[in-house]
Image: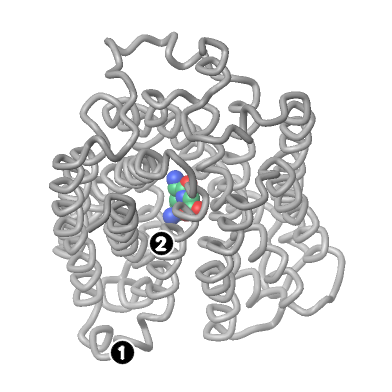
């Protein structure tokens, strides 16, 4: 096979690996009802199963990123898929509850490292161009995983009919397929290292490594953290309940309305990745997509427009930002620090996700949000709108800075051509 095709095989392997793990991340919500009915779980026990996913990564995502730079993305991917599979299996064993929690914690640990290592791997294989399209296609498969988990109750109705445990074993099995794809990825990566970018091996880790990033990197980091801390807590935790209480929908319709954002992202994300690769203007694309988020919450809080309007706006934002932001980040740092950079972002993002989930729930509780009091959700919407507005301001600063250095920074031709590297050469 011609060398230039190998990177697409690597991308396919990475995409299949992430799909199973995103399915498993989203596998708790569909079994929540069964866990409540068959095992008497409270809402907070169910919530905890997702909370423990983020908590360890506040400390460990950065360590994972540094480790990736030291041992290489391919080896980290393989190790992480094994950890994910053990975690998903312990979750499926599920009894006692402590073991189930430990399984989710282990799965969260492996999953975040896996996610970062796969992104680093793609950035390395597509270092000569096409990175945005490649990462966008990768995210499409991740969305297939999320969408499939949402739809699994109807696709695999007989599995759900067997009780709470069978769907979790299905998730564990899908995660395990990732070990197989990761092993092939590892073997090919080891055989053809000359085809991907290999940065110099990092010396001993020093805190200084976290300080040499350009200002554009920090603007992009805040956009990434704030966007994720608004999008996932709203769409993955509160939106279904919000749609039912405020928009008068039943559970099935609210779930379907929510899944449209993920379904749309499957197809729209690669389109925006292609646009970013072809026309560049990444900062402007990010600015445009970030502007849609506060607008979405403003419309939700103050108008009676059909839900399709905000679904469309958020769907565009959710398709543009992931497709553009990760390859852009890789443009801004030197090759051998991409793992550390992604780890740093995911560490702060985990903190943001945990805090935003907690604060939104707290605001809904103190304002007694519910079907009797739909205005009780306004504080949560205001919080999400405020956070998305700060994210948008961060993109404005990014646009201003990038306009001052055309062809460099975020618009550098090849991945890993950071400001620091450019100045040296
Ligand atoms: N799967 C929900 C949490 C994902 C956190 C992850 N670190 C991330 O940034 N994902 C980006 C995405 O667009 O999926």
Residue that label 2 marks? 142
**Residue at image location 47% in from the left, 29% down from the top:** 416
Quote the CA–CA distance across marks 2 and 1: 22 Å
Q: Secondary structure at mark 1?
A: helix
Q: Nearer the viewer, residue 232 or 74?
A: 74
**Quarter of the image where one finds residue 402:** top right
387 horizontally vs 207: left or right = right
Which disc is residue 282 wearing? none
Residue 403 sits above or below residue 380 on the image:
above
Q: Secondary structure at mark 2?
A: helix
Q: Nearer the viewer, mark 2 or mark 1?
A: 2
Q: Position of residue 257 (x, y in %)?
A: 60, 78
Residue that label 1 marks? 157
Mark 2 burial class by Cα count in 10 Å: few <14, some 14-19, many 20+: many
Q: Is mark 2 within 8 Å of ligand 1?
A: yes
Residue 366 sits above or below residue 75 on the image:
below
**Quarter of the image where one finds residue 258:** bottom right
């Amino acid at each position: 096979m011609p060398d230039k095709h190998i990177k697409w095989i690597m991308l396919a392997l990475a995409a299949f690996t992430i799909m199973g793990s995103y399915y498993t991340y989203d596998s708790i919500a569909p079994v929540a009802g069964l866990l409540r009915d068959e095992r008497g779980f409270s809402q907070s026990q169910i919530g905890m199963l997702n909370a423990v996913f983020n908590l360890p990564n506040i400390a460990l995502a950065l360590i994972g990123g540094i480790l990736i730079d030291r041992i290489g993305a391919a080896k980290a991917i393989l190790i992480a898929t094994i950890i994910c599979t053990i975690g998903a299996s312990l979750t499926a064993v599920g009894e006692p509850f402590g073991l189930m929690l430990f399984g989710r914690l282990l799965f969260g640990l492996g999953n975040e490292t896996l996610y970062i290592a796969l992104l680093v791997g793609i950035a390395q294989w597509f270092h000569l161009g096409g990175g945005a399209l490649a990462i966008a296609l990768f995210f499409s498969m991740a969305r297939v995983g999320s969408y499939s988990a949402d739809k699994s109750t109807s696709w695999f109705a007989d599995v759900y009919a067997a009780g709470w445990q069978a769907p979790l074993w299905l998730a564990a099995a899908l995660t395990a397929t990732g070990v197989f794809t990761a092993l092939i990825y590892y073997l090919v990566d080891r055989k053809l290292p000359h085809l991907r970018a290999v940065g110099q091996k990092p010396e001993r880790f020093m805190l200084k490594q976290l300080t040499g990033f350009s200002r554009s990197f920090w603007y992009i980091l805040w956009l990434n953290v704030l966007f994720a801390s608004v999008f996932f807590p709203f769409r993955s935790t509160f939106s279904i309940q919000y749609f039912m209480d405020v928009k008068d929908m039943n559970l099935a319709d609210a779930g379907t309305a929510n899944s449209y954002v993920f379904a749309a992202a499957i197809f729209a994300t690669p389109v925006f990745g292609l646009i970013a690769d072809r026309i560049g203007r990444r900062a402007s694309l990010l600015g445009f997509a970030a502007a849609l988020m506060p607008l979405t919450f403003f419309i939700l809080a103050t108008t009676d427009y059909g839900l399709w309007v905000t679904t469309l706006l958020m769907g565009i934002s959710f398709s543009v930002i992931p497709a553009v932001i990760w390859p852009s980040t890789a443009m801004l740092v030197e090759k051998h620090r991409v793992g550390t950079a992604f780890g740093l972002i995911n560490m702060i993002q985990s903190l943001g996700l945990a805090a935003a989930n907690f604060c939104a729930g707290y605001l809904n509780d103190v304002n007694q949000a519910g079907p009797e009091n739909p205005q009780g959700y306004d504080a949560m919407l205001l919080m999400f709108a405020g956070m998305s507005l700060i994210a948008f301001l961060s993109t404005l600063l990014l646009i201003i800075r990038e306009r001052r250095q055309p062809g460099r920074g975020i618009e550098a031709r090849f991945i890993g051509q950071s400001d620091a590297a450019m100045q040296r050469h």
